[in-house]
Image (cartoon, rainbow, N blue to C red):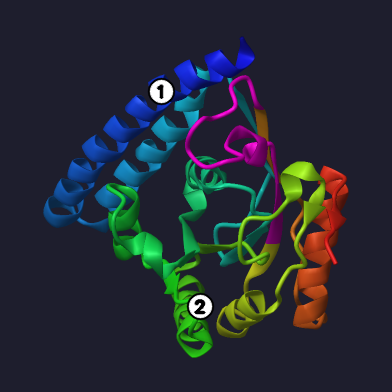
C-alpha cells in the first residue's frame, strides 16, 4: 500500500514541480530583463520556496534550524553534505538574506526550466568536472564575487551525491573550499548538515518516498583565520558528521 501511495503522490508532486519550474522560468526572464537582478533574485527565492513547501503534497516534512546572527557584512562559504538535487531549494529560501550562489556542474546550466536560467544569471560557478583548470577558475571567480559583494557561496565538497542516506559521507575534497578562501579571505565558513533528502528520492525523481522527514541544520561558523585551509575543510566535515551521526567513507 505504501508503494502505491509513493507512486500516486509522486505523480501529484511532479506535476506541481513541473508547473512551478515553467511558471517561474517565465517570471525570471521578465524580472531579469525588465526589473533587474534584485527582482530576479526575489523570483528565484519564491520559486525555491514553492519547490520546498510543495513536498508537503507527498506527506513529507521539512525542518530548518538556523544560526542566529550570521553576518551580512562579510562573505560566507556554506559547506554542506550532498544527498540529493533537493538539497538546494531550502538553502536558497531559508538563507535568502545571504544571497547563496552555488558551485554547480556545468551540465545543469542547460535543459531545466527555471533552474538552468537561474544558474546562468546568478553568477554560479559552473564547473566542468573533467577540466580541473576550468573548474578552479570558475570557483575562483565566485570567490572574488562574494568577497566584493559580501554574498555567500554554497559548495558540496563531496563532489557528488553521497551514500549518506545509508550512513556514510564521501570524504570532502578540499580544493574548492581552498580556492574560495584564497579569493574571499574575509569569508566565514559555515557547515550545513542535511538529513533525509537521500531517502526522499533514492532512485531519482520517480518514485519519491512519501512521508519523509527532511532537515537542514546550520552549524556554528568556523573562523579560517589562523587555520590551514585543509583543517577548515576537515573541521567542517567533522561538524556535519557529528550532527548527522555519519561515518566518512574510505
Residue 138 visible in the current orientation? yes
Report the side of 215 relative to 46 (left or right). Answer: right
Callout 2: few (<14), some (14-19), or many (20+) C-alpha neighbours within 10 Å? many
Q: Residue at x 74, y 59 (%)?
A: 221
Tally the numbered discs.
2
Q: Quadrant of residue 169?
A: bottom right
Q: Position of residue 229 (x, y in %)?
A: 75, 80
Is 231 colored magenta in this rendering? no
Identify the element where label 1 is drawn: helix
Q: Residue at x 71, y 56 (%)?
A: 191
Q: Earlier in the sequence, mark 1 or mark 2?
A: 1
Closer to us: 53 or 247: 247
In which quadrant of the rendered image does the C terminus lie? bottom right
Identify the element where label 2 is drawn: helix
**Which residues are the magenta region?**
190-212
Q: Position of residue 1 (x, y in %)?
A: 61, 9
Query: Dot 2 corresponds to which residue?
Result: 139
Is 207 colored magenta in this rendering? yes
Q: Position of residue 176 (x, y in %)?
A: 61, 76
Query: Dot 1 corresponds to which residue?
Result: 11
Residue 65 visible in the current orientation? no
Amino acid at each position: 500500500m505504501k508503494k502505491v501511495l509513493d507512486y500516486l503522490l509522486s505523480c501529484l508532486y511532479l506535476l506541481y514541480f513541473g508547473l512551478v519550474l515553467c511558471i517561474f522560468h517565465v517570471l525570471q526572464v521578465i524580472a531579469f530583463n525588465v526589473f533587474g537582478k534584485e527582482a530576479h533574485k526575489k523570483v528565484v527565492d519564491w520559486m525555491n520556496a514553492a519547490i520546498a513547501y510543495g513536498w508537503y503534497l507527498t506527506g513529507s516534512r521539512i525542518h530548518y534550524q538556523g544560526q542566529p546572527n550570521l553576518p551580512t557584512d562579510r562573505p560566507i562559504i556554506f559547506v554542506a553534505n550532498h544527498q540529493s538535487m533537493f538539497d538546494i531549494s531550502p538553502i536558497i529560501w531559508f538563507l535568502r538574506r545571504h544571497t547563496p550562489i552555488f558551485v554547480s556542474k556545468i551540465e545543469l546550466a542547460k535543459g531545466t526550466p527555471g533552474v538552468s536560467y537561474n544558474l546562468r544569471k546568478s553568477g554560479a560557478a559552473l564547473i566542468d568536472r573533467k577540466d580541473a583548470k576550468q573548474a578552479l577558475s570558475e570557483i575562483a571567480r565566485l570567490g572574488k564575487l562574494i568577497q566584493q559583494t559580501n554574498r555567500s557561496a554554497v559548495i558540496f565538497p563531496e563532489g557528488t551525491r553521497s551514500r549518506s542516506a545509508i550512513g556514510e559521507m564521501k570524504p570532502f575534497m578540499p580544493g574548492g573550499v581552498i580556492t574560495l578562501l584564497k579569493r574571499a579571505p574575509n569569508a566565514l565558513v559555515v557547515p550545513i548538515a542535511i538529513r533525509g533528502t537521500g531517502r526522499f528520492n533514492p532512485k531519482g525523481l520517480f518514485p519519491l518516498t512519501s512521508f519523509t522527514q527532511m532537515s537542514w541544520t546550520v552549524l556554528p561558523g568556523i573562523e579560517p583565520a589562523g587555520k590551514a585551509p585543509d583543517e577548515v575543510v576537515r573541521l567542517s566535515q567533522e561538524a556535519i558528521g557529528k550532527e548527522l551521526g555519519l561515518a566518512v567513507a574510505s
